[in-house]
Image (cartoon, grey):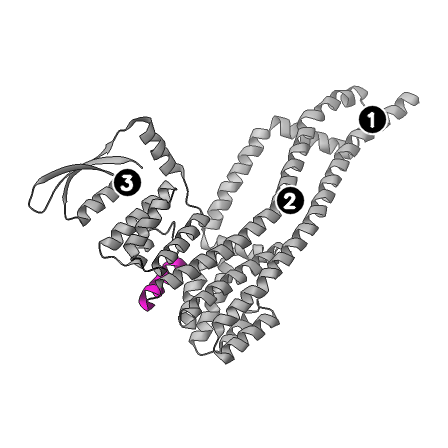
Amino acid sequence: MPKYTYRARDKSGQLITGSAESGSKDEVASGLRDLGYSIVDITPQADGLGGLSEYYSRVTSRISRQETIVFTRQLATLLRTGNTLTSSLENVSEQVKNPKLKAVLNQVMRDVQAGMSFSKAVAKHPQVFDGFFVSMVKIGEAGGLLDDVLERLASLGADELEIRSRVQSSLIYPVVLIGLSLAVVTFVLVAVLPNFVAIFEASQAKLPAPTRMILGLSSALRNYWHLAAGGIVLFVIWLKYYISTPEGRFRIDGYILKTPLVGDLYLKVMISRFSRAMAALTKTGVPFHEGLAVVENTISNTVLRKTFVDIRERVNIGQGVTEAFRSSGIFPPMVIQLISSGEKSGHLDEMFSEVASFYEPEVEYTLRNFTSLLEPFLLLVMGAIVAFIALSVLLPIFNLIKIIKS
């Protein structure tokens, strides 16, 4: 981590100098103020190539979801064994290798030592700890169950990470296949087909429509590739802007849910995540409508989020939980039956766990179906494209052979 030299005055006005390692100049200043010092100046300490490499590592490193889960589980374990929160944070921070996460944890530890609650300390770092994490920690602090809540957060994060890794691993082959196919087709159009142009022009024969089409595409790629590249860049910029608007995001999210196979898979993943989060909240004694208010913000799809907002509003006006979920129209009858059983028995937490357990194999099944259908479809499409290119080249050659024979 970068080093800083500082000059400060204590409460008696005596000048104090020293050095400190920290993630930023602001963190050094915050630490000195917590000690009651008045800051005179703070200067970065130049320490050669090693300092530059550490600074580069701190700036370019990112905090992965897995690192956050490991931190959460380690903190829960230390708290359960009787350690104080500050000593637990210090112990965990010493074991963290990611410099950016270490800087965040050190800042959280200093805030807690200064008297700030743990939930407020982590809320200052939304890039690491999302709203659901902060809300769960706040609930754990209020009920004296911080270790239990952190353990639930770690387990929930691990489940989500496993589902995400399954989806990503299932999509690797189709993505690679698409990329290689596009590369091969582009190579044929740009590097191979131009060799036949001179032959076709020398023959002065009328070229078939498929040949004229494919030669035109080849010429466009070779002569106007920069326009095509610029058009793609402009389209990506426009799409990012459109998605950033509320209306655009809502429409894109709606299209995702309506896409065959992809929409079904996405819906099941989101409902599984929602159910796990609701089970974790209701197990800690959070009222159902308050749990909905917390969890709905973790749903990234705006169309689904609106659906869960409608469910919460129906519950708030007195409608039964089962009826509110049934009216949403996105849950199958078996899930509605599980929620109904949980509402009648007063064990909604267990029923939401059952819903998540019901959807996890469904996600696996949908993934298998998706990949098993996508792979032959892609092969068929790419085969048709290659056959069209081959036919476009061979047709005029066959015509030339007929002319030579005649």
Mark 1 vs mark 2: in front: 2
Image quarter where the C terminus lies is: top right
Binning the other alpha carbons within 10 Å of mark 1 as few (below 14), some (14 to 19) or many (20 upward) gives: some
Which residue is identified by label 2?
A: 174
Q: Which residues are magenta?
A: 131-145
Magenta-highlighted stretch: main secondary structure? Answer: helix
Q: Position of residue 189 (x, y in %)?
A: 69, 29
Q: Amino acid at mark 1?
A: Ile
Query: Within the magenta stretch, is there residue 389?
Result: no
Residue 288 vs residue 373: left or right?
left
The mark that comes first in sequence, 3 or 2, is 3
Kindly tell me whether residue 124 is visible in this rendering.
no
In the image, residue 65 sits, relative to residue 335, either above or below, namely above
Kindly tell me whether residue 49 is visible in this rendering.
yes
Q: Residue at x 26, y 29 (%)?
A: 46
Q: Dots 1 and 3: beta carbons under 8 Å?
A: no
Q: Amino acid at mark 3?
A: Ser
Q: Position of residue 403 (x, y in %)?
A: 89, 23
Cα distance in 3D space between marks 1 and 3: 70 Å
Binning the other alpha carbons within 10 Å of mark 3 as few (below 14), some (14 to 19) or many (20 upward) gives: some
Which corner quadrant of the image does residue 139 belong to? Answer: bottom left
Which residue is identified by label 1?
A: 397
Cα distance in 3D space between marks 3 and 2: 43 Å
Image quarter where the N terminus lies is: top left
The mark that comes first in sequence, 1 or 2, is 2
The mark that comes first in sequence, 1 or 3, is 3
